[in-house]
Amino acid sequence: MEYRNLGSSGLKVSVVGLGTNAFGKRADKESSIRVIHASLDAGVNFIDTANIYTGTLSESIIGEAIEGRRHEVVLATKAGLVAGEGPNERGSSRVHLMREVEASLRRLRTDYIDLYQIHTFDPYTPLEETLRTLDDLVRAGKVRYIGASNYAAWQLMKALGISDRLGLTRYVSIQPSYSLADRTPELELVPLCLDQGIGLIPYFPLAGGILTGKYSGPSNPPAGSRADKDPNFAKRLKEEQYMTLAAQVNQAAQEMGVTPSALSLAWLMHQPAVSTVIVGATKVEQVEQNVQSADLHLDDETLARLDEMTAHFKYGPPFSYARLP
């Protein structure tokens, strides 16, 4: 396994990370724990979750799974999206973050979080309030590093500027949707990350499974797959651009003798500023396949081919993003 610094920080993360938003839903507790243990055994140390994944079940399952192995894990979680019906159960205000970090610590069965991330930009709370709260959490030892998710480039740069001006702990990472099917971060976010030493953590690196080759169209998705369980995601399979891309990536992968998943993940790992790639798994076999992508070297010709076939995805809407209502 390859390990990279998370941005300009000293924190080392595995280039393959584990995404856990299926734990407790598409993967039951026992399956999820097996996936976590298999990931750790394979050298994956970065585990990413959030306070709201599967109604808090994801954090609880992870907490149980890593007991006795906490020292092997770079544990990342998030807060900021809607966690309840009350007016203070969302966003990145001091009251909400202080409440949510304590709840996450209890569920994760730990006394510190390695990377605490704001799940999306909060237009209703001053950034200074959010950043001072995060700085307090770092100084209290409850959080070691802080990051953002679903921030636009200008929002991230504004946050960095405030932290620098006030001497507060700085974001070290940003988590956007980024894949061969979504190259919008390359326009502004990637150049910003390179300039400011921010680690890029792509989520949806396989476009929810579209880049795995398991979908041939909107009809009859595999049982248990995201398209089978999530009607909103299933709508994606009706969009011709994604099915065309899936076929092109599958063809390129066949010619190389690798899987479409491995090729898509390896492409991301070759992109500048990328520190770790969050890949979901519901089975141990998927973990084994995902880990193999870390050893796949792509030559200049292959990179150029993939760039040419997906260049238009730089200019469309993001494949996924989260915003506060």
Image (cartoon, rainbow, N blue to C red):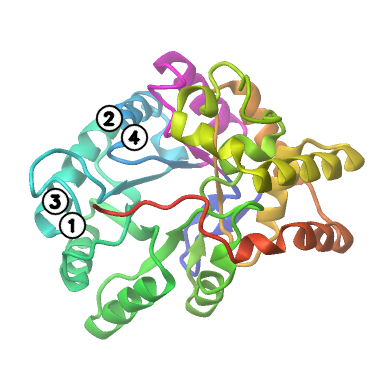
Q: Nearer the viewer, residue 277 or 324?
A: 324
Pointer 1 or 2: first along the chain: 2
Q: Nearer the viewer, residue 165 or 68?
A: 165
Residue at mark 4? 53
Measure the C-alpha gap from mark 1 to mark 4.
26 Å
Left or right of residue 29: residue 314: right
Residue that lies at the very extreme toward the right in this rendered image: 255
Measure the C-alpha gap from mark 1 to mark 3.
17 Å
- For image coordinates 17% across by 42% down, the residue present is 102
Q: Which mark is residue 151?
A: none
Q: Amino acid at mark 3?
A: His
Left or right of residue 271: residue 234: left
Question: Residue 243: which quarter of the image?
Answer: top right
Q: Nearer the viewer, residue 74 or 302?
A: 302
Query: Start and end of the magenta stretch?
Result: 17-45
Look at the numbered discs 4 and 2 and tell me whether their residues touch, using CB distance below 8 Å. yes
Residue at mark 3? 96
